[in-house]
Image: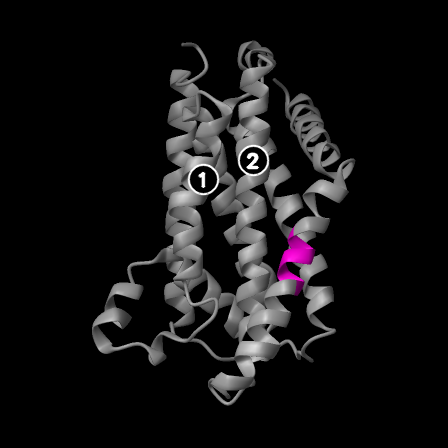
Amino acid sequence: MSPREQWIAFQSIVIKEVMRFARIWVQTILPPVITTMLYFVIFGNLIGSQIGDVHGLTYMEYIVPGLIMMAVITNSYANTVSSFFGAKFHRHIEEMMVSPTPNYLIVAGFVSGGLARGLSVGLAVSIVSLFFAGLNLHNVLVVVTVAMLTSVLFSLGGLINGVFARTFDHISIVPTFVLQPLTYLGGVFYSIQMLPEFWQGVSLLNPILYMVNGFRYGILGVSDIELWACYGIIIGFIAVLFTFALVLMQRGVGIRN
C-alpha cells in the first residue's frame, strides 16, 4: 500500500471507532461522569472531611487527578476490548486481515478509538471536577502526555483482551478481577506515604500507581513517585503490549481459529 492508501485505511478505522462511541454518548460518556460525581460527593465531601489535608492539599483536591485518571483508564480499555471483540463476533475483522492494510495500522486504528474515548471522558470528568475543587495546572505538558500515554497503554490492553476473548463474558473478566482492584489500589484515593513501609513497597509493584502519580504531579505538583519513573513504566508497558499485539495479529490468534 502507498502512504496515501495507508493513511486512508487508518483514517477509516479511526472514524469508525470514534463514531461508534460518539453516537451512543449517553451510554459511553455520561455514565462515567455521573459515577465520578458520586465519588466526589461520597469520598470528597463526606469521607474527605474526616481525613484532613494530604500533602498540604484538601482531600477533595488530592483525589481529583486520580478520579480523572481512573475514568481515562477504564474507558480506554472498555472501548477497545468491546470494539475488537465485536469485530470478531460479527466477523468483519477478517475483512481487515485479508486486506493489504498492515497489522500495525489496524492496531493503531483501534487504539486511537480507545484514546479518543478515554480522553473525551477524561475531559468531561475534568470539567465536572471544577464544580467540586478549584485546580491550577502545575504542568500542562505532563498532564497531556501522561493522559495520552496511559490511554494508549490501556487501549492496547483492551485490544489484547479482545483478541483472546471467546464470549462476551470474557471481556469483563480482566476489568473486574484485575483492572478494577489495581486501580483502587493505585493511589487514587490515598498517598502511599499513609501506608506502613511494607505496603508502600508492595504498592510500588502496581503500574497504575505510576500513572496516577504522574498525572497528579502534572495537575497538583505533588507525587509519591519520581516523574521519570512514571514515564519509564508507561512507555515500557506500551512497547511490550504493542509488540505483543502485533505478534497476536500476525499469527491470527483468536481470529483464524
Q: Which residues are magenta?
A: 32-37
Q: Residues within 10 Å of mark 2 (few under 14, many from 20)?
A: many
Residue 188: x percent and y percent? Answer: 47, 66
Asked if residue 85 is positioned above or below residue 195 in the image, the reply reads above
Q: What kind of secondary structure does the magenta stretch mostly adopt?
A: helix
Residue 131: x percent and y percent? Answer: 74, 73
Q: Can you see residue 79?
A: yes
Residue pointed to by mark 2:
80
Instruction: Give the camera-side residue of 138 and 170.
Output: 170
Whether residues under marks 1 and 2 lie with C-beta atoms below 8 angstroms apart, the answer is yes
Q: Quadrant of the N terminus?
A: top right
Q: Residue furthest right?
A: 23
Q: How far is mark 1 from mark 2, CA to CA?
A: 8 Å
Residue 69 falls in which quadrant of the image? Answer: bottom right
Q: Which residue is at 73% across, 65% downward?
A: 127
Label 1 sits on a secondary structure element that is: helix
| Residue 157: mark in rendering | 1
Instruction: Give the camera-side residue of 154 and 27.
Output: 27
Q: Quadrant of the C terminus?
A: top left
Residue 124: x percent and y percent? Answer: 72, 58
Q: Can you see residue 138?
A: no
Instruction: Give the camera-side residue of 47 and 128.
Output: 47
Q: Which residue is at 38% across, 44% downward?
A: 177
Sequence order check, earlier mark of 1 and 2: 2
Label 2 sits on a secondary structure element that is: helix
Residue 42: x percent and y percent? Answer: 59, 70
Q: Residue furthest left?
A: 198
Q: Which residue is at 61% across, 78% downward?
A: 45
Residue type marked 2: Thr
Asked if residue 48 is positioned above or below residue 30 in the image, the reply reads below
Residue type marked 1: Gly
Residue 223 belongs to the span the image colors magenta: no
